[in-house]
Image (cartoon, grey):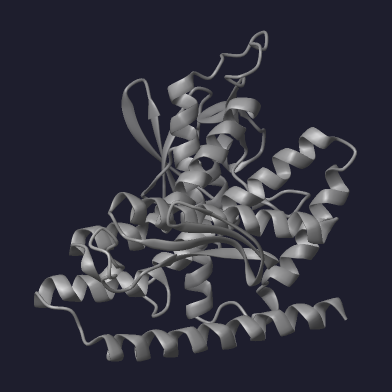
Amino acid sequence: MSIILTVIIFGIIVIIHEFGHFIAAVKSGVYVEEFAIGMGPKIFGIKKGDILYSIRLFPIGGFCKMAEEDNDEVDKKGFNSVSLYKRMIIVLAGVFMNFLLAFVISTLLVMFNGINEPVVAEISEGYSAQKADMHIGDRIIKYNGKKIHIYDELRFYLNTYSGGDIKISIERDGKILDKIVTPTKNEYGAYIIGFSLNPKSPFLKEKIEGMEKAGFFESCKNGFWSMVCMVKVTFYGLKQIFTMNVSIDEMAGPIGLTAVVGDVYEQTKENIWYTIQSMASLVALLSANLGVMNILPIPALDGGRFIFLFAEMIRRKPLPPEKEGVVHLVGFVILMIFGIAVAFNDILKFI
């Protein structure tokens, strides 16, 4: 089951990404030859208009094949034949769709589960929050100078806490106050300051007695910041990799993710609703992750292609196609080597 769920998760994320390129290309007048679900040999295809819609053998990934140059027919333009700004939109459309998917799923989860406002609801005795004279009703607005919009951001910063005092900025009765706190570990090994936040009941469920109900726009706002938090988590992970604070043993590729999906499924399979929500959360996180990875200025990725288009805008003429092709090829080879190394490490973990 874990393999099937992993294939479905990756399939959704990649198809949404490629659909972004597809719809942007079609709307820009670029001739799309094929939109494929899966990779490898074609096992089924149907042609509608000039576009071949196909299903391929290996159910991971997909692609949108665009004509590169002018076609013989006047109304069928290649990618390189449309304006620069249209090419920029097409290149970034896949990343946009990944972020949009993460936002939509996050918002729906909030609407079904409710939110925790960054407002203090209770103070735990003996912890740093009490010692710093924090009060019930205080709205947390900053953590060490970084803005706090939702609980997820505060939890992320506490999860990356490395010691020392923390400055928490709060809003109380219209005034901004700074509190110095020192997070401490609880019995589960998590760092806490010693307060709980104010919950609101879900927008799409009946109001819970004694609890304020989250509104539609409030839920959407919370979903947006949840997606932004996922992006922050991804960039933090990349920073840890590039600064050598994470070894390859701590990384995981699609094979390693299969084990994670399997664990989540085993923990939630007694309740199908929990399983759906858990898998949806993974889709949102991985979609945001893919969006970040693709926007990086690395050859062979969307971000790398965008850099070449940006250089064309500055130079007012395109770079030589053969040189651009070599750069993308080198980038692709490096990414493949890295992917193989991570996959090999995943296999060793299984063994």
Residue 63 is situated, as x and y percent measured from the top left of the image, at 52, 65
- Of residue 219 and residue 329, the one placed in the foreground of this image is 329
Q: Residue at x 79, y 80 (%)?
A: 347
Residue 3: image location, x then y, percent: 80, 61
Count every numbered label the image shows and give the total. 0
**Residue at the extreme top:** 209
| Foreground of the two, 25 or 265 | 25
The one nearer the camera, 42 or 271, is 42
Q: Residue at x 57, y 39 (%)?
A: 105
Task: Determine the residue positioned at 73% across, 59% down.
Answer: 6
In the rendered image, residue 154, in percent from the top left (x then y), is placed at 52, 45
Vertical arrangement, residue 113 with respect to residue 310, above or below: above
Using residue 11 as the reference point, say whether residue 333 is left or right of it.
Answer: left
Where the C terminus falls, by quadrant? bottom right
* Any part of residue 170 in sight: yes
260 sits to left or right of 56: right
Q: Is residue 165 visible?
A: no
The quadrant where residue 248 appears: bottom right
x, y percent for residue 229: 49, 49
**Image vertical order of residue 211 relative to residue 150, above or below:** above
Q: Is residue 70 left or right of residue 139?
A: left
